[in-house]
Image (tube, rainbow, N blue to C red):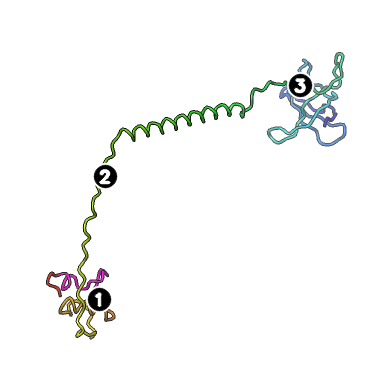
Amino acid sequence: MRIEGTLAKWNDDRGFGFIAPTTGGPEVFVHASAFPKDGQRPRLGERLSFEIETGNDGKKQAKHLVCLDRSTVGRTPERPRALPHRETRQGPGWLGRLLPMLLVAGLGYYGYGAFMQRSQITESRSVPPVAVKTQSAPPVTQQATPEPAPENFRCDGRQHCSQMTSCAEATFFLRNCPNTKMDGDADGVPCEEQWCNSPFAR
């Protein structure tokens, strides 16, 4: 919206001043760059027509200034009109450029697949089948399990390997008696260092 006012203050050395709107209100800052480039200097009391915009510093200032007291030849002062929009010829859109590329890529992919299939058939006919040697799995060795304990053993409160007299007795205590401490590695075989790891354990 255009506003009219008069140039109330002007600093010619610093190139700025203030406009007092005719409708009242606070004075509006104006810079020398907002005046028309007609070779005339701003004058105090000069009537002006302007628009208010916010500058980069966040302060309001006068823009699109028209000096109402200055003489014009053959026309009334007005805001410079924007240049008419130039129509540009647009080439084919991105879809028109993309379709030929997709078509070429599809033909190339189809030709490559047909070539690879033909070459695989030729190789399968020319190369004799190769016998595949199968390796038999190594025999699985089973760990010998302790023999079942005789029935003449009984739980009498012993807990340690040093209190046993054979692997069979230690196995019986481990399987049947509570709170035994004869299987440190919890593998189910008791007293491996004293009784059940010896080739003569029984």
Q: Residue 71: x and y, percent?
A: 86, 16
Identify residue for label 1.
181
Q: Nearer the viewer, residue 181 or 144?
A: 144
In which quadrant of the rendered view does residue 41 lie? top right
Q: Is residue 98 above or below residue 71?
A: below
**Count of numbered labels shown in the rendering:** 3
Residue, disc 3: 84
Image quadrant assignment for residue 158: bottom left
Residues in magenta? 183-197
* Earlier residue among tags 2 and 3: 3
| Secondary structure, magenta segment, majority class | loop
The one of 64 and 166 positioned closer to us in this rendering? 166
Please report the residue visible at 35 percent of the width from the left and 32 percent of the height from the top.
122
**Distance from Cα at disc 2 to Cα at disc 1:** 53 Å
The three-letter amino acid code for the residue at tag 3 is Pro
Mark 2 or mark 1: name the one nearer the start of the chain: 2
Q: Secondary structure at mark 1?
A: loop
Secondary structure under badge 3? Answer: loop
Q: Which residue is mark 2?
A: 132
SS class of the residue under badge 2?
loop
Contact (CB < 8 A) between labels 2 and 1?
Answer: no
CB atoms at circles 1 and 3 under 8 Å apart?
no
Distance from disc 2 to disc 3, alpha carbons, whole Å, reads: 82 Å
